[in-house]
Each structure stands twice: as C-alpha cells, then as structure tokens.
Image (cartoon, rainbow, N blue to C red):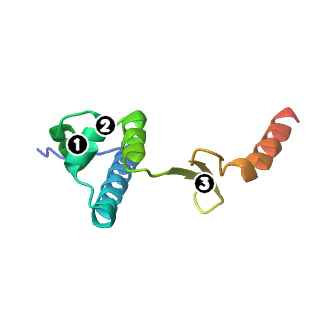
Amino acid sequence: MSYLFEIGSRRRKTSRLIGMVRDELVRAFVHEKVKSNISQDDLANKLDVHKSVVSRDLNSGVNMSLSKIADYAWAMDLDIVFKLKQKNENTYEASYDGEQSAIAPHLAVLDDIEQLEDA
C-alpha cells in the first residue's frame, strides 16, 4: 500500500503562488537588510508586533494574507507588483505605487472582451 497522494493542479498552483510570494518577501527583506541595515526587530517595531511574529512569517511556510503582505511592503517602504498572464501570452499587470496602476494599458483588452460577450 502506498501512502503517496496526488496533488491536483489547483492545489499545486496555490502552493506555488504562496511559496513565490513568501520567497519574494524574504528576498526583499534580505535586500533591505543589506542596503539599510534593517532587522527583524525593526520590522516588528514598525508593524507593532512581537519579533517572533516576523520571524515566523519570514522563516516558515505560513500562508500570509494580502493585508499582511501589504503591511510588510509598507514597513520596508516597497511597492507591490502583481501580474497575471495567459500561458505564453501577454501579461496583465497591476501595481500599486501610491499613484498609478500599470493595468491601464490593458483596459483596451477588457473592452474587446466585453464587445465579444455582447455579440
């Protein structure tokens, strides 16, 4: 009897996204640590949480909410960029830098989709 189980494509995609986001957050922290000498203590103080919370978030596979990710970006004074794309096609990008969204050039695509749906 085998105890192996199959992970479906939906769960695999979810797990990869969670891992990619956490890896990017850790990379950003390491970069800021080298550049600005920021520590986990500094992040914890800025976020008004205990240092163990920051340590757990950065060192484990914990599933963080978008709100928590945004908090870390704020604490490190970083912008967030989010991209969705069809396999082997154009990228749909939304970024928030406090002023503008990079999704605006893609609104024409949405208009085309609406026209196709109306036809």
Of the two numbered discs 2 and 1 in the rendering, the one whose residue sits closer to the viewer: 2
Point out the tag, 3 or 1, that comes first from the N-terminus: 1
Point out the tag, 2 or 1, that comes first from the N-terminus: 2
In the structure shown, which secondary structural element does the residue marked by tag 1 occupy?
helix
Q: Tell me the crowding category of disc 2: few under 14, some 14 to 19, or many 20 or more residues within 10 angstroms, Cα based.
A: some
Residue contact at pointers 2 and 1, CB within 8 angstroms? yes
Distance from the alpha carbon under mark 2 to that under mark 1? 9 Å
Of the two numbered discs 3 and 1 in the rendering, the one whose residue sits closer to the viewer: 1
Q: Which residue is mark 2?
A: 47
Can you say which quadrant of the picture contains the C terminus?
top right
- Percent of width and height locating residue 75: 37, 45
Q: Residue at x 14, y 46 (%)?
A: 2
- Percent of width and height locating residue 108: 80, 48
Distance from the alpha carbon under mark 2 to that under mark 3? 36 Å
Q: Decide: is 35 above or below 50.
A: below
Q: Amino acid at mark 1?
A: Val
Q: Residue at x 65, y 47 (%)?
A: 101
In the structure shown, which secondary structural element does the residue marked by tag 2 occupy?
helix
Of the two numbered discs 2 and 3 in the rendering, the one whose residue sits closer to the viewer: 2
In the structure shown, which secondary structural element does the residue marked by tag 3 occupy?
loop
Report which quarter residue 115 is drawn in: top right
Q: Residue furthest bottom?
A: 34
Q: Amino acid at mark 3?
A: Gln
Q: Amino acid at mark 2?
A: Leu
Q: Nearer the viewer, residue 35 or 13?
A: 35
Q: Quick check: 14 left or right of 34?
A: right
Q: Nearer the viewer, residue 70 or 17?
A: 70
Q: Which residue is mark 3?
A: 86
Q: Residue at x 64, y 60 (%)?
A: 89
Point out the tag, 2 or 3, that comes first from the N-terminus: 2
Q: Which residue is mark 1?
A: 54
Q: Tell me the crowding category of disc 3: few under 14, some 14 to 19, or many 20 or more residues within 10 angstroms, Cα based.
A: few
